[in-house]
Amino acid sequence: MSHQGANEERLVETLSTIKRKYVVLSGKGGVGKSTVAVNLAVGLALKGMKTGLLDTDLHGPSVPKMLGLENFMSSGDETHLEPAVRYDGNLKVMSIQFLLQNLHDSVIWRGPLKHSVISQFIGHTIWGDLDFLIIDSPPGTGDEPLSVVQVAKPDGAIIVTTPQDVATFDVRKSIDFCNKLSLPVVGVIENMSGFICPHCNKETAIFSTGGGMKMADEFGIPFLGSIPIDPQFVIHSDKGNAMIDLSTGGKSIEAIRSIIQKIE
């Protein structure tokens, strides 16, 4: 069997042990997509679901920082990659960062090589039996999202936006991208939907609100929920902790838990 044939066989074998695969997309950067992906994956793991989290941003991986895994180095050989394991074995994480000796190394790859790397990430990682694989994809509709959809064959896409028109305009491209690839859209999440004041707990619509719901209604796709801006997200992410693991209440945490219930 050729090397390529062996890789494809390995990929098929790996995917066969994963019950549901969701790719998290956004039309543009800066909408908090990776933060949402991390908290969804951790939330599922905390509920006892065997969950994988794959960071496919080959140029600016942020998932390791959010989970305190910056110094983790994956071991293995040409066909097996060991993921980082958290939450009593319920969460397995893989990122390009785990293969770099220097945290600040840059990665310069062209399209075909990106496709090959993403294929190996998915197929060669020792995921084991998973209830969910959450795939954090770079923003836009370029090489990486296309490779993820072609290789992982996800069951659906979760699209993250912010409320303002400039963000929802770009998300329309993501929806068109999904339609052209026959990828079902699980739903839209409106992130940064209002600001929760940490002192008075009042909510202010800094970026307006409701844009995500309006767009979802326009396209006839599910609206999964709105997550308000909460300064604690930044604080906990910088410390390497998922917000949903550390907070017991508040509108942001309630919103994420509600979204998780809808995608289970």
Image (spheres, rainbow, N blue to C red):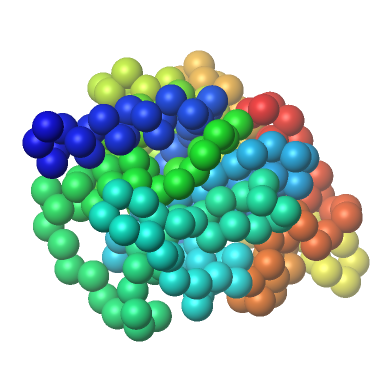
Nearer the observer, 219 or 175: 175
Q: Is residue 69 above or below residue 148?
A: below
Residue 244 screen position, x and y as percent: 75, 54
Q: Point out the image quarter for the N terminus.
A: top left
User: Which quadrant of the structure image shows residue 77?
Assistant: bottom left
Q: Give left or right: position of 250 versus 231.
A: right
Residue 37 located left or right of residue 40: left
Which residue of the protein is positioned furthest toward the front in this rendering?
1
Residue at point 36% right, 51% down?
Answer: 80
Is residue 179 visible to the viewer in this orientation of the structure? yes
Answer with left or right where residue 260 lies relative to residue 81.
Answer: right
Residue 75 in percent (x, y) is at 41, 65
At x 50%, y 77%, the residue is 71
Whether 202 is drawn above or below 183: the answer is below
Residue at image coords 69%, 37% = 49
Q: Residue at x 13, y 41 (%)?
A: 3
User: Which image quadrant: the C terminus?
Assistant: top right
* Closer to the camera in the image, 71 or 241: 71
Instruction: Tally the numbered discs.
Output: 0
In this picture, is 215 found above or below 196?
A: above
Q: Is residue 134 visible?
A: no
Q: Quadrant of residue 203?
A: bottom right
Where is 168 relative to 184, above or below?
Answer: below
Give x and y (percent) for residue 250: 85, 54
**Residue 119 percent coordinates (x, y):** 27, 43
